[in-house]
């Protein structure tokens, strides 16, 4: 069963909260706030799927709340619908220009409120799905190259501040063209998906990222991992791929599918870029290929 979406209702008048709650409580999990300050606090704790926000409130008003929400990385994408007695185009324009997605006027019309809330929650769900698809590889379910490069950019900047360790692993399936030629392209796809699952089993830390970089090439970002730690992960990747025991009669190094692995490890320094790290790991991978394949060069 999918969880109920959470709607945060913000209004300084309890009677308004009661009216909106009566419309929505069967379909959503409802939480309340009766001031702007409380709204921000509650939003940060419950991370609602949608916020119904009163404009006129003593203290922090709805506009200020909206501005604060939009500046918060975790809350900026939560749809905000303003609710107000003001039947005033300027107020509506101001709310929408601050990033609110919609506007309803009081007295609340129950059917309209219910439909708007439902539509915006559905749109938000589709937007989230699309955003997730944009950074996910369809064949393997791993992160794709886009997420890898984004994450690596963020990590290099973060780790450079403390000059902490970072390791990047690149790996590539050996003699994969011959595999496709022998077993066919669909079997090749299944092989890529299995190697991805092996990689996923080997890269276990929540802060680590495993991605399909392209074709039959994968990359891992291991924040905080020094050369020894990265070597341990690389050996585990190799062992997991080996334990898949995917037959490959045309491989020149084994009777089963193998991977070549390159590792780049260093303390992060200011100015180091994602491209530099990928380039370094790729150079090691090239050495692994050039010196015989089915091996780790770190
Ligand atoms: P090496 O050991 O040097 O890596 O040799 P290789 O044959 O694996 O390397 P090469 O880069 O020449 O070939 C990679 C092959 O991977 C070629 C391409 O057809 C295949 N490939 C790339 N993406 C996919 C995919 O999504 N599915 C399948 N089935 N094959 C793919
Ligand atoms: Mg009010
Ligand atoms: Mg290859
Ligand atoms: Mg390749």
Image: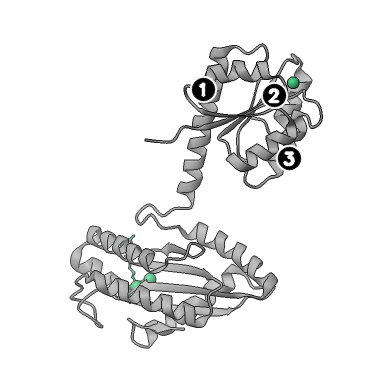
Q: Quadrant of residue 261?
A: bottom left
**Residue 294 in the image, given as x and y percentages of width and height:** 32, 81
Q: Residue at x 51, y 57 (%)?
A: 146
Residue 76 visible in the displayed image: no
The circle drawn on residue 25 is 1
Q: Earlier in the sequence, mark 1 or mark 3?
A: 1
**Residue 134 in the image, given as x and y percentages of width and height:** 48, 49
**Residue 42 in the image, given as x and y percentages of width and height:** 65, 37
Q: Is mark 2 within 8 Å of ligand 2?
A: yes
Instruction: State how far apart marks 1 and 2 are (Cα).
Output: 16 Å
The circle drawn on residue 11 is 2
Q: Residue at x 60, y 37 (%)?
A: 78
**Coloration mode:** one colour
Instruction: State how far apart marks 1 and 3 are (Cα).
Output: 27 Å
- Mark 1 and 3 residues: CB-CB less than 8 Å, in contact? no
Up the image or down, 45 lies above or below 220; here it is: above
Question: Is 48 situated left or right of 135 in this image?
Answer: right
Q: Residue at x 34, y 82 (%)?
A: 293
Q: Earlier in the sequence, mark 1 or mark 2?
A: 2
The local secondary structure at tag 2 comes to: loop
Please tell me how crowded label 2 is: few (under 14), some (14-19), or many (20+) other residues with Cα within 10 Å.
Answer: many
Residue 83 visible in the displayed image: yes
Q: Residue at x 42, y 67 (%)?
A: 203
Instruction: State how far apart marks 2 and 3 are (Cα).
Output: 17 Å
Label count reads: 3
The local secondary structure at tag 1 comes to: loop
Task: Write down the residue under mark 3.
Answer: 68
The local secondary structure at tag 3 comes to: helix
């Amino acid at each position: 069963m999918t969880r109920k979406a959470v709607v945060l209702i913000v209004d300084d008048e309890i009677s308004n909260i009661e009216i909106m709650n009566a419309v929505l409580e069967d379909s959503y999990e409802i939480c309340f706030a009766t001031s702007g300050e409380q709204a921000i606090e509650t939003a940060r704790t419950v991370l609602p799927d949608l916020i119904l926000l009163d404009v006129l409130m003593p203290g922090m008003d709805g506009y200020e709340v909206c501005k604060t929400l939009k500046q918060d990385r975790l809350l900026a994408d939560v749809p905000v619908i303003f609710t107000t007695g003001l039947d005033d185009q300027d107020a509506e324009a101001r709310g929408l220009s601050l990033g609110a997605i919609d506007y309803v006027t009081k007295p609340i019309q129950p059917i309209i409120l219910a439909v708007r809330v439902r539509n915006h929650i559905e749109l938000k769900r589709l937007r989230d799905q699309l955003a997730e698809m944009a950074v996910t590889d369809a064949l393997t379910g791993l992160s794709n190259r886009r997420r890898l490069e984004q994450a690596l950019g963020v990590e290099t900047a973060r780790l450079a501040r403390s000059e902490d360790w970072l390791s990047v692993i690149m790996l590539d399936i050996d003699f994969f063209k011959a595999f496709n030629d022998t077993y066919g392209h669909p079997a090749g796809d299944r092989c890529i998906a299995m190697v991805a699952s092996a990689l996923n089993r080997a890269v276990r830390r929540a802060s680590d990222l495993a991605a399909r970089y392209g074709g039959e090439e994968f990359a891992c970002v291991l924040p905080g991992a020094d050369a020894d730690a990265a070597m341990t992960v690389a050996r585990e990747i190799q062992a997991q791929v080996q334990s898949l025991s995917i037959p490959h009669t045309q491989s020149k190094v084994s009777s089963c599918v193998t991977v070549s692995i390159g590792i780049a490890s260093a303390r992060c320094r200011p100015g180091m870029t994602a491209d530099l790290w990928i380039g370094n790991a790729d150079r090691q991978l090239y050495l692994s290929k050039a010196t015989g394949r089915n091996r780790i060069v770190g």
